[in-house]
Image (cartoon, helix red, strand yellow):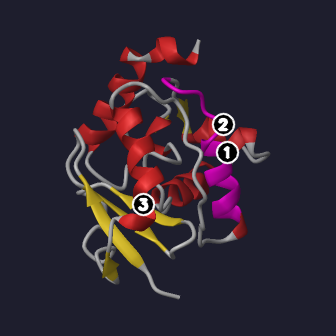
Amino acid sequence: MTNFYTTVPSPIGDIVLTSNGEALTGVYPPENSHYAEAQKGAHDAKPFKEAIKQLNEYFAGERIEFDLPLAPEGTEFQKKVWNALCKIGYGQTTSYGQLAKSLGDANASRAVGTANGRNPFCIVVPCHRVIGASGDLAGYNGDLKAKQWLIDHERAHIKLAA
């Protein structure tokens, strides 16, 4: 199966999208550790038409959740964490410890943090909504300024979630 990628301009920098031709396989902001390696395969924007549309709507403050086919690759635990991320409300935040507790193991905050950091779908699967127990930004596989921008952006458009 051919892998595709494209880049999308955004307020936090150019985002790389990857796909297997049927579903998204990654969404990587500029400071993400996989940003450069994601730009392999066929450069083609066609498989990303809907993803680009939805990301543009999100950045315009017109979308609070994504409805895109995803093809996540990870362990069962990672997938469980990524699914839990999608349940954090738009404009809301939770801590790694709270997320671990919601998954049934209050002592798994480090494992949750590791899984969160390996989320291949930044923004679409909202790992930016997880913060440190003190309320400080922590552990984003990207730029903490981008994480803060995403949180502030959502809070500025919270009326959408009402």
Residue 39 locus on image (x, y percent) = 28, 75
3D distance between C-alphas at marks 3 and 2:
24 Å
Pointer 3 residue: 48
- Kindly indicate the quadrant of the structure image that contains residue 111: bottom right
Q: Is residue 18 magenta?
A: no
Q: What secondary structure is the magenta-colored segment mainly?
A: helix
Q: Is residue 89 magenta?
A: yes
Q: Left or right of 97: which side holds 137?
A: left
Q: Left or right of 151: which side holds 76?
A: right
Q: Nearer the viewer, residue 145 or 101?
A: 145
Q: Which mark is residue 87?
A: 2
Q: Residue at x 72, y 67 (%)?
A: 76
Dot 1 or dot 3: first in sequence order is 3
- Kindly indicate the quadrant of the structure image that contains residue 153: top left
Contact (Cβ within 8 Å) of mark 1 with mark 2: yes
Q: Residue at x 67, y 45 (%)?
A: 84
Q: Amino acid at mark 1?
A: Ala
The secondary structure type at the circle numbered 1 is: helix
Q: Amino acid at mark 2?
A: Lys
Pointer 1 residue: 84
3D distance between C-alphas at marks 1 and 3:
25 Å
Q: Quadrant of the C terminus?
A: top right
Please tell me whether mark 3 or mark 2 is closer to you in this view: 3
3D distance between C-alphas at marks 1 and 2:
5 Å
Q: Which residues are magenta?
A: 77-91
Q: Amino acid at mark 3?
A: Phe
Residue 126 locus on image (x, y percent) = 50, 42
Q: Residue at x 38, y 25 (%)?
A: 61
Please tell me whether mark 1 or mark 3 is closer to you in this view: 3
The secondary structure type at the circle numbered 3 is: helix
Q: Residue at x 30, y 60 (%)?
A: 32
